[in-house]
Amino acid sequence: MSNQFEYDDFVFDGDTIVALTRKGKDKIKEEKIKSMPIPTTNPEGQAIKKIGEKAFFRRFFTSVEIPDTVEEIGFEAFGQNEIEEINIPESVKEIGAFAFYRNKLSSVKIPKDVTVINKYAFSLNNIESITWNEKVEKIDVSAFYDNNLKEVEIPDTVKEINEFAFHNNNINQVEIPTGCEIDHRAFEENTEVIKN
């Protein structure tokens, strides 16, 4: 554990971090803590595999450290913070809807086993670049809505891009694989998009 935090600052449910306790919330507020190191284990020594729904929602963190034991990031887990940079470990297989929405991310790297970018997962950030893996098959509704992307190269593995997936960016060029199904609103509100 970090010297700033103790186990009783968190609520655990087996291998899942559910939330901050009242003590944890008060500590963040009183000490104006902006950086959150996520515990690697629960008090019994079991590895943390999931960050639960809204676990760190609207805590105004500028950075978080996610341990490489984590396999799932839940719905709105880090929504409405001020996170500027994130290292999502390669162990992560699922990133929930709204997981990182309304932050200040400038780039994102998708872990190797993630197959779906869920709805609004990275919306309302400052993302300028995406590093894809070779397994993503679906980019869901508004996944990258309202960012600063200019050029996007969609991986050949992607089969489906849903409505508003890249809405309201600065995209002027996008490379889309053959056979990919694209909603006609997927790239609305961009610079003149040139699809290759």
Image: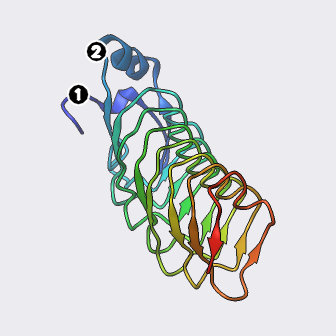
Say which element carries label 1.
loop
* Amino acid tagged 1: Gln
Residue 73 tag number = none
Where does the C terminus fall, quadrant-wise?
bottom right
* Amino acid tagged 2: Glu
What's the CA distance linking mark 1 and mark 2?
A: 10 Å
Instruction: Pinpoint residue 101: horizontal percent, then vertical percent.
Output: 56, 42
| Residue at the limit of the structure toward the left, as seen here | 3
Residue located at (39% from left, 14% from top): 26
Q: Is residue 127 above or below residue 109?
A: above
Residue topped by disc 1: 4
Q: Is residue 54 above or below residue 131?
A: above
Viewer-proximal residue among 186 and 21:
186
Residue located at (44% from left, 68% from top): 111
Direction from residue 171 to residue 126 in the image, left or right: left
Instruction: Pinpoint residue 20: horizontal percent, then vertical percent.
Output: 46, 28
Say which element carries label 2.
helix
| Residue at the limit of the structure toward the top, as seen here | 30
Residue topped by disc 2: 31
Graded by Cα atoms within 10 Å as few (under 14), some (14 to 19) or many (20 or more), the crowding at tag 1 reads some
Instruction: Pinpoint residue 110: horizontal percent, then vertical percent.
Output: 46, 65
- Disc 1, disc 2: CB below 8 Å? yes
